[in-house]
Amino acid sequence: MGASPMPEEKPADAVEKFLLEQRAVEDRKQALIDDLLHQRAEAMKAFDEKLAKLGYKLRDGKPRRSHHKQTEADGAASPKGKPKA
């Protein structure tokens, strides 16, 4: 049986080729992520502009009400907070 001579790549060449392909995939992945983040920012900006046109105003740092128990520091600042004995 005559074994056909296969063109053998050096192991280092195969590794370099693989690393270049991996780098290209990672670069493409990062470019897609950056594009999605840009699209998201543009969509949020457009949505905020639509809300502004409708007269919606954002809260200026007002904390939302929460069903979670207040910590001692929050309870001390709140006049309605019961003093803990």
Image (cartoon, rainbow, N blue to C red):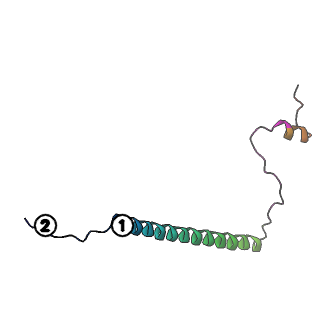
| Amino acid type, callout 2 | Ala
The stretch in magenta equals: 57-72
- Disc 2 is placed on an element classified as loop
Q: Locate the N terminus and report the quarter of the image it occupies.
A: bottom left
The mark found on residue 69 in the picture is none
Q: Residues within 10 Å of mark 2 (few under 14, many from 20)?
A: few
Measured Cα–Cα span from mark 2 to mark 1? 22 Å
Along the line of sight, the residue nearer the viewer: 75 or 54: 75
Q: Are marks 2 and 1 in contact (CB under 8 Å)?
A: no
Along the line of sight, the residue nearer the viewer: 19 or 75: 19
- Count of numbered circles in the view: 2
Q: Is residue 71 above or below residue 30?
A: above
The image position of residue 33, as x and y in percent, is 56, 67
Q: Is residue 20 above or below residue 74?
A: below
The residue wearing badge 1 is 14
| Amino acid type, callout 1 | Ala
- Disc 1 is placed on an element classified as helix
Judge left or right: residue 6 versus residue 32: left
Judge left or right: residue 10 versus residue 54: left
Instruction: Say whether residue 66 is magenta.
Output: yes
The residue wearing badge 2 is 3
The image position of residue 77, as x and y in percent, is 90, 41
The image position of residue 78, as x and y in percent, is 89, 41
The image position of residue 15, as x and y in percent, is 39, 64
Along the line of sight, the residue nearer the viewer: 61 or 23: 23
- Residue lying at 61% horizontally and 68% vertically, measured from the top left: 37
Outermost residue toward the left? Answer: 1
Q: Residues within 10 Å of mark 1 (few under 14, many from 20)?
A: few
- Residue lying at 34% horizontally and 64% vertically, measured from the top left: 11
Instruction: Say whether residue 82 is magenta.
Output: no
- Dot 2 or dot 1: first in sequence order is 2
